Amino acid sequence: MTPMVVALAVAAGWPLARTVWLSFTDATLAGPADVAWIGFANYLEHDAGEWYGVLADPQWWHAVRNTLVFAVVSVGLETMLGLAIALALNTPFRGRGLVRAAVLVPWAIPTVVSAKLWAWMLNDEFGILNHVLLGLGVISAPIAWVANPDLALGAVIAVDVWKTTPFMVLLILAGLQMLPQDCYEAARVDGVSPVKVFLRVTLPLLWPALAVAVAFRALDALRIFDLVYVLTANSTSTMSISVYARQQLIDFQDIGYGSAASTLVFLTIGLAAIAYLRLVRLRPGETA
Amino acid sequence: MAAVVLRSVTKQFGLSPVLRDIDLEVADGELVVLVGPSGCGKSTLLRVIAGLEELTHGSIEIAGRRVDGLPPQERSVAMMFQSYALYPHMTAYQNMAFGLSLARYDRAEIARRVHHAAERLQISALLDRKPAELSGGQRQRVALGRAIVRDPAVFLLDEPLSNLDAGLRARTRLELAKLHRELGATILYVTHDQLEAMTLGQRLVVLREGRVEQVGTPLEIYRLPRNVFVAGFIGSPAMNFLDASVVSADVREVLCKLEGGALVRAAVNGTPLHRDERVTVGVRPEHLHQTSDPEAPLHGNVTVAEVVGEACYAYLEIAGARDGFVVARLDADTPVRAGTALQLHAPPERVHVFDAAGDALERSGMRRS
């Protein structure tokens, strides 16, 4: 027990505590040596009739909105696709082992690599997507998928779905394989239609595994950074709260302010996790 | 009217046959036990009748209607699984009502049926509980209740007692027999337990390697096993088998010489046999009696004596015995212990003779149906 607590304190507790502490200071990247305690000024401060701080920054709230849209839509799509693919992979067919392995490939590629890969495929001038769509006559002019503010977030979500659905498939498939097979035979003798079996037997039994999978993915999605940053850099149209915090910390070299943003990222995700777990546990019919 | 008729039922998984050419008629209201060692195909046969497995060849009729080719729910069968297969997320009530609600029975009818079955099975107080909150015996009842509410033409029970502990199993066995009588239901019952088979079945079907070895009432099968396999499988402790050769044989009696030289008489029709033919002599432990006759056919030293209360099982080393020893069920008061020399005698009408192929010779003076 003790070594674990020490390891956790060193690896997680200390950086967290330091970030929280820095968020109450005016530290900068240039000289963290002489820092002054400025209280909540990095978060929210009223000065000369103006509001300052992260919470007063429309850019921050825009990032919050982006992050929430990204998390809800991508996790939603990944869950539905993951469920469908996992159900397909759970039925026996020739070459299933091969397909199961192949499905994991997008997830096995490092995010930066796959993001770069997609950045090229989505490139407005040289990208294969525009090339194909133009060739098919679907579009008449090349589309700037990641540069167009209306499309960029959608592109980021699409790439994330491509990349992370396999993870969802894996978790749901594991859940499906834990389901008692005899129930399905009982359902067959009972004459339950496949749709009813799915809705009334599979889904309720799969619920705990599904809930854990969604929790994993949602917490991951809320702190999305690499994919957004590689695909669209600091573009405000896709900026997530993590990208926002990094921009403040590194580009603007404002450690105090950036730490306040980071702390808010941490709080947001923490609260989301607690709220979600509450919600899941309160679902009726799930005790086991 | 026959409730279930199987004709040349054959099932293959890939190239390996699991059921071979099975013919069977089950009368309306009859409880027939399918019994055999594991891998004999008894569960597969039940699943084929239920429609969970497709037939490779043959036909199945239930209540006068051909059903092979129909999906399970149209066969008018209810199946109870060895593991009970209850839906873990539903209460006992929901488990029992699920099939009915999907078959579009109205609520009142479903409630009536479930409560009626629950009362019969004494689980009315448990209807709001989920399987995880029920004991093994209670789950077994819920599974049985789920079958009962369907009011099927045939109940298919796959090892329904095997997950219960010994005491509960005996009690539940009695209750099942009573339930069968009350419901007047047709039941096909699978078990590997020959005691369960003997006590519950009106008729037994003994299966081995996908074939029907013998069909008959428990007593018929006990008294007149058709071959070595059936003789050894039914009865506990199992029948003793001894290698022997024919000394003389006629229509009334066969005289066999055991390997040790002793002679054994068997009241069987020996006309198919010829002198010196190799045969197997079978005697049940309970048909061996202690005798003071020094010429008694079986004699040897007791190696182990097990006193089990009502009886004493004496294990004797005897030359030619199939397992190396012969078991005799003696009176518990018989003073035997390891090392005691025993002479045993078996009445000829209790001695079985099997030919080289393992088939039993007919009991003399009897016609096998």
Image: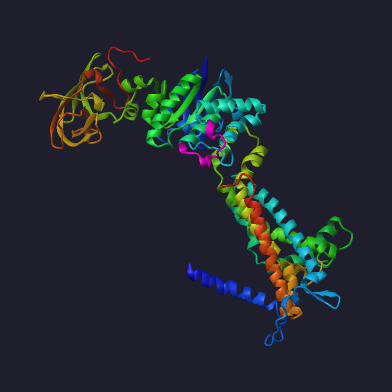
Q: Is residue B131 magenta?
A: yes
**Residue B54 sits above or below residue A222 on the image:** above
Q: Which residues are magenta?
A: B124-136
Residue B302 against residue A283 in the figure, above or below:
above
Q: Would residue B266 be seen by someone viewing this image from the given angle? A: no
Left or right: residue B269 compared with residue A45? left
User: Depth check: A271 or B148 in front?
Assistant: A271
Q: Is residue A181 left or right of residue B364?
A: right
Say which of B130 and A201 sits in front: B130
Spot occupied by residue B316 in the image (x, y as percentages of width and height): 19, 34
Residue at the outermost top position = B365
Residue A138 % position (x, y): 86, 55
Residue A58 x %, y %: 82, 69
Left or right of A126 in this view: B239: left
Farthest residue to the right: give it. Answer: A140
Residue at the spot x=13%, y=37% of the render?
B339
Residue occupying the point 41% across, 26% down: B174
Residue B296 seen in this snapshot: yes
The x, y position of residue A178, in whole percent, is 55, 48
Q: Quadrant of residue A62?
A: bottom right
Say if the magenta span includes residue B5.
no
